Amino acid sequence: MAFNELQLKVAAQAAVDASKPEIAPLTLFAHSYNSEIDGVFGSAIAVPTTDLEAAEFGTNGYMGEDEFGGELVTLDKHFTTSLRITDKNLAYTGIDFARNAGKSIGGAIGRACYKAAVAAAEASTKAGTLGDDVFALPELAMTKGLPVHGAVALVSPAVWTLIMKNIGAYSVYGGTSMIQEGIANNCLGFKAVLPCPYLTDKTKALVIAENALATAARYLPPVFEDGVVTTKVADENGFAYGLRQFNDNKMGYGYVAGVCLFGTKIVDAKGVLKLA
């Protein structure tokens, strides 16, 4: 009753297609996604972050003391989700079930990671009020000391609709990404502006400096391999997680599960602005 090679391939591709849109916003910030290195729950991953200042030429010449290091992000979230099907139904819907299972699992894993990062950012105490003028976003960010050109604005669906209406058609804005992909690159002076459905009701926008938020993800291999068919799913950014297929022969069920290790951290609370 185990998935065959084709079913696993179909499920993996469907999972990537579903998780990629959810993870894409997180790649705008500091991150470490590496499909070549497996993870261990609770381990610390060094996420590269660099925020330098220039100064007058001094006694050290060109030999500065700033190191290219990283912020340690703990893989403290073990996200899982699964589907089950009877052996009878799997016999009739093998490829279709594999595709739909992969799609559902990939979407769920991606959403869980994105939601965790947004929740961490919303916990920031640096707050302000946006009001009804969405074009005040850059001014509010700069007033709070955020580098607008190096920051991303996650806005509520309502604010996104106002921006869409006020900026107008893509022919005026100068690009199609706002209409086709739901992201406005280099908009209002920000690195990107995009709608986020996971903000709480009272939050209209989160402005986050690109090095203020760090995330890490790793694939978790199974410890007990007997009776488990597993495959590593990874996109071109290296974001990886596992698909596991196993059976309960006594009950006549087959299961497909998604497994991902994830961690998120606010590196610099001053680089996060929450607007109500």
Image: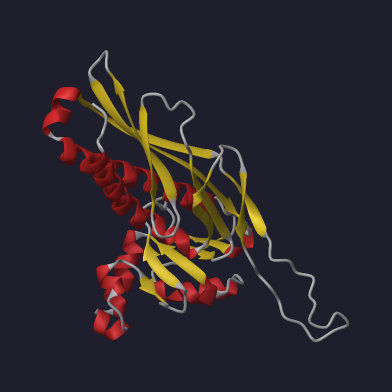
Q: Quadrant of the N terminus?
A: top left
Image: 202 above or below 230: below
* Count of numbered badges drawn on the protein: 0
Give left or right: position of 3 versus 126: left
Q: Is residue 145 visible?
A: yes
Give left or right: position of 72 versus 200: right
Q: Residue furthest front?
A: 5
Which of 69 and 156 lies nearest the eye of the viewer? 69
Where does residue 269 sit, x and y in percent of width and height? 62, 58
Name the residue rendered at 40%, 63% in the picture.
Answer: 155
Which of 30 and 96 lies nearest the eye of the viewer? 96
Give left or right: position of 122 versus 99: right
Q: Is residue 204 visible?
A: no
Image: 7 above or below 55: above
Choose top left, top right, bottom left or bottom right for residue 204.
Answer: bottom left
Where does residue 202 sit, x and y in percent of width and height? 43, 53
Where does residue 85 sit, x and y in percent of width and height? 21, 27
Which of 91 and 54 lies nearest the eye of the viewer? 91
Name the residue rendered at 30%, 80% in the picture.
Answer: 175
Q: Residue furthest top?
A: 250
Where does residue 12 sit, x and y in percent of width and height? 31, 46
Name the residue rendered at 35%, 55% in the picture.
Answer: 20
Image: 143 above or below 19: below
Give left or right: position of 29 versus 226: right
Name the residue rendered at 57%, 54% in the picture.
Answer: 124
Give the colouring mode of the picture: secondary structure
Which of 232 and 23 lies nearest the eye of the viewer? 232
Q: Residue furthest right?
A: 59
Choose top left, top right, bottom left or bottom right for residue 174.
Answer: bottom left
Image: 9 above or below 164: above
